[in-house]
Amino acid sequence: MFAPVPRQPDHREIEPRILAFWADRGIFGKLVERNRDKERFKFLDGPITANNPMGVHHAWGRTYKDVFQRYHAMLGHDQRYQNGFDCQGLWVEVEVEKELGFKSKRDIETFGIGRFVERCKERVLKYSRIQTDQSIRLGQWMDWEDSYYTMSEENNYSIWHFLKKCHERGLIYEGTDVMPWCSRCGTAISDQEIATEGYRELTHKAVFFRLPVLRPSDFGLRPSNEYLLVWTTTPWTLTSNVAAAVHPELDYVRARLEGNIYILAKPLLHVLGKGAEVIEELKGEKLVGLHYRGPFDELGPQQGVEHEVIPWDEVSAAEGTGIVHIAPGCGKEDFLLGKEHNLAVIAPLNEDGTFSDSFGWLTGVDAQAAAQPVFDSLQKKGLLFRVEDYTHRYPVCWRCGQELVFRLVDEWFVSMDTLREEITESAKQVRWIPDFGLARELDWLANMSDWCISKKRYWGLALPIFRCECGWFDVIGSKEELKSRAVSGWERFDGHTPHRPWVDEIRIKCAKCGKPVPRIKDVGNPWLDAGVVPFSTTHYLTNYYYWKEWFPFDFICESFPGQFRNWFYAILTMSTVLEKCSPFKTILGYAMMKGADGREMHKSWGNAIDTDEAFDKMGADVMRWVFARQNPVQNLNFGYALGDEVRRKFLTLWNVYSFFVTYANIDNWVPGSGFRGQDSEPQPLALLDRWILSRLNSLVKLTRERLDDFDPSPVPRAVEEFIDDLSVWYVRRSRRRFWKSISDTDKQAAYRTLHDCLVTLARLIAPFVPFLAEELYQNLAQPSIANQQSAIDISSGRATTPESVHLCAYPEPDASLIDVALEKEVGLARAVVSLGRAAREKSNLKVRQPLSAVLVRLNEPAEREAILRHAEIIKEELNVRDLQFGDKDAPFPPDYAVEENPEHAVGICKKLTPELENEGLVRELVHKVQGLRKSAGFEVTDRIELHYQASPRLVVAVRTFEDYIRRETLAVTVTGEPLADPDIRETAKINREPAELALKRVRE
Ligand SMILES: [Zn+2]
Ligand SMILES: [Zn+2]
C-alpha cells in the first residue's frame, strides 16, 4: 500500500519532516561517502557577507548552486561542499557602530579598537549561524561544519602572500589621488564600490557666480568690469578653485548687462536673462590664458595661486555657462587636469569632511553645510549671480548613505599597468554564461584604474606594509616572515589573529635608515578577502597537492551586476598574479532581483520580501522553482504571485500523484510485481503509454543536455509541459483504464507506465525541488523496500532502491523509447482538439453537448494520416460523432464555428438534433451527479442509488440513456421513486430543465 495522499501538498508540513528525515538517516553524509574519490565536479562558493540575515536574492543564487551540486552528486561526482562567509570590512563595522550607537571613528578609538574588532567578529559569527539555518531551510546541501570564513588566519595570510608577490614585481605603491570619500566612515570609496551601487537622485543648491577678469594696467593686472560667468553644484569646492576651463572650439560671447561685461558660452546666453547685449563672439581658445581673480583669494591656501583660464575638451554647453570651475584637490577629473596643466592642488578637507585649520572662518565647518556661508561670502564680495535648486545623480556611501565628497588622499595601490594584459588573458580562458559577461569583464579591465587596496579603518585584513618615515617600505608575506623580522612587539601580538590592534604592535627594521618601523594603519579592501578564496580554501600555502587536485574550479555562480568589478575581478587578478590563469572555467551569472512591481525592493515601499517570511508563505521548493525557471539574463521581479503560479503547477503534479496512489491502493497494485499473484509478463504498450514514455525520455534527455551546459531555466519549463501532458492528456485519456473492474494487462501497463513516469520525474526534479521530490519518491518507490521481493530497478544498474531520491542516479534517457514522430503526432491531435474547443467556446457550446461533426482543414496533407490515427481520441475529446476533412481552400459551411492557427483550421458543426440535445442533457446530469458524489464524500468505488424527478423532456432523455448513466455514476438503480434516507439531495437546473436529484450509497 502507498500512504494515502492529502488533497494538497503542505510545504509547512513536508519540508521540516524531510529535513529531519535527511538528518536522521545521514543522507548527505552517505552521498558524500558514496561519491568520494570518483570523478570530480569542482565548485567554488563565492562568500556571502555574514552581516545580516540572508536576503531573498541570496536564495536565488544559492538555488543555482545547489541545483548543480545536487545534479552532479546524482551523476556520482566527488565534490567539495564548502560554503563561504565574507567577514571583514566596512559593512560589518557600520552595523556594529549602529549597535553601539557610535557616530564617528573617534567613538571607536575611545571604545578601544581591540574591543571593537572583537564585536565585529561576534557579529559575523552570529549572522553566519543565522544564514546557515536559512540555507538549510532552503534545502541547500553543504558541509556546514566546514564553512570557510574570510577572517580566518589562513585567508589573511594567503592575502599577505599575494601582496608580497605583487611587491616582488614592483606593483605596490602609495599614491596620492582624489577619491570619493565618506566623511562619516572616514574612508575612501573605491571605483568598484561607487560604480556598483553608489548613486542617488539628490537636489542641491547650484550657484552662478562671476569672476573678474584681470586686465593689464600701469599697476600690473587689475580687476576689470569684465567677468567670467561660472557655475557649480558643489559650492564648498570654490574655496579651492585654481582655474577655469573652457572648450577651445566652442563659441563664446562677451555680452553687456547692466554696465558689466559677461563671458559665457553662446548657447547658454539665456542664463543672463533679458537685456543682455552681445558685443563680441569668439572661440574658447581666445579665452585661454586669461587671468581672473579667484572667489576666495583671501583664504590662506590661496596665497600665491595664479588663476588662469585653461582649455578642456570635456567642457560642454549642455548646462551651466560653458565655463567650468576647476579645483584639483576636490575632484577626480580636476586632479588629472591639474597634473596636465601643472596647477596648484588645494586640499581643503579633514578626514571627517570639515575644513582644515588653514581655512580661516571656514575651519571646522562641514563641507556639505558650507553652501550657505559660501553664498553669503560671494554676495558680500559682489560675486554672486544667482542660486537655484539642482537635481542630479550624486554619489553616496554605499554602506551608510552619507553623501560623498571628493578628497585628496594617500592610499595604497596595486598597479594595473602590466597586469591588465595578463588578467585579460585569464578572463578569456573562462566560459562566461551569458556570454556578454566576457565583454563586460574586458570592458572593466580595459578601463579600470589601479586597484586601491587600502582603507583607513579597523576591522579588516591588516595590510602587511611597513613604511618608514624615510620613505622606505616593505611588504611581509607570511606570519613566519613577520616573526623573523620583528624587532619588537612580537610577544604582544603572538596568540592573536592578524588583526588590528594586535598586529600594530610589531616593529621591523628599516633597511635604509635602521629605525624601527610600524605597520601602516590601513586595512585592506575587502575584495582581497574574497579574491583569495580559490587559494586559501584549498590550502595553497600548506597543502600543495590538495590544492592541485581542486584547482582550477569547474564552476562558479554569482549575480552578474557588480561582480565584474568586484569578486570576478578580484579572483581573476589574484589568480593571475599567483598562477597566471583563471581560477575557474565556467561562470553562470544571473541578473538582479527586484520587487514584484519591478522596482528595487524597499521595506518602506512594501515590496520587499523577507526570506523567512517567504519560506513560511511560499515554501522552499516553490521558491527554488521560481528561481530556477527564471531566465538568468533578466531581472527577477519576485513576489508571491509568482509563487502561486508555481504552486498551481505543483498541484497538477500532486493531483496526478494522488490519482495514482488512490487507484493503485484500490487495485492493490505494487511496483515491480504488478497485481499480486498475477503474471506481469510485459505486453506491447498501448499508444498512450508509448507516447508518454517517449515524452518522459525526451524530457530526461533535454534536462541532462541543459544541465550539462549550465543552462537550468529551460528545465522547469519543460517539466511543467510534461506535467501538463501527463495530467491533461495521459491520465485523463487513461482514466477508464484505471477504472476497469478487471485487472488485465492493459490496466497493468497503465499502472506501470504512470508509476515509472512519477518516480523518474521525482529523480529528475530532485536537484530543483529536493523536498517535493523526496516526498513523492518515499511514497512511490519505497514500498518495494518494505516488500523486498519486488524491489524495482529504480536507478539503472542497481539492485535495490536507494534510501533517498538524492542517493539515486540521475535518470538516463532510454533512446529506444523516444519516438519523436509519435510525439509530433499527438501534439498535432492536441492542437486540433484545442482549436475545436476554442471553436466550441466561441459559440457557447459546452463540451458536454455532443455535436454531429468536426471538420479539419490542413495545410500539410501528410498530417491527415496522423490525425486519422488519433481520430477516436479527437472525436471523444471534442464530443463529436464524426471527423471530416475539408479542402485546404474550401470555405466552411455556414453552420460551423471555426477556429484556426497558421497550419490548421477546425470547424465544429453547431446544428443540434433532438437526439444530440437529449444526450447533452444526460451528460450534464451525469456531471451533476458526479459532483454530488464528491460533495457527499463517497469513495470513487462506491455504488449508489440515484433518484431523479424532472421535466418531461429530461425524463425522456434519462430513459433513453439510462445504461450510460448507470455506467458513469456507478448507479445500481436509476429511479423516479423517492429514496428513504438519501445521503445527499439537490434541486438543480440541467441546461435550464429543472430536476430533483438524490443519492444514496449502497452498503454491501
Ligand atoms: Zn559611509
Ligand atoms: Zn627608514
Image: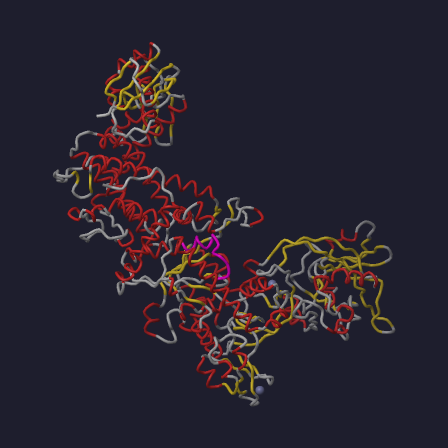
Q: Does the magenta stretch include residue 630?
A: no
Residue 790 seen in render: yes
Dividing the image into four quarters, tell me where ligand 2 lies.
bottom right
Outermost residue on the bottom side: it is 514
Left or right: 52 in relation to 735: right
Q: Position of residue 511 (x, y in %)?
A: 53, 88
Residue 572 seen in render: no
Q: Position of residue 650 (x, y in %)?
A: 36, 41
Vertical relation: 919 (above or below) 647 = above
Q: What residue appears at the point 30 percent right and 37 percent down from the top-left corner?
A: 656
Q: Point out the image quarter for the C terminus.
A: top left
First to last magenta residue range:
49-62
Q: What residue appears at the point 63 percent right and 60 percent down from the top-left corner?
A: 402
Vertical relation: 84 (above or below) 494 = above
Q: Point out the image quarter for the N terminus.
A: top left
User: Quarter of the image holding residue 924?
Assistant: top left
Vertical relation: 341 (above or below) 467 = above
Q: Position of residue 933 (x, y in %)?
A: 31, 26
Relative depth, front residue between 803 and 180 = 803
Relative depth, front residue between 302 and 258 = 302
Q: What residue appears at the point 80 percent right and 65 percent down from the top-left corner?
A: 213
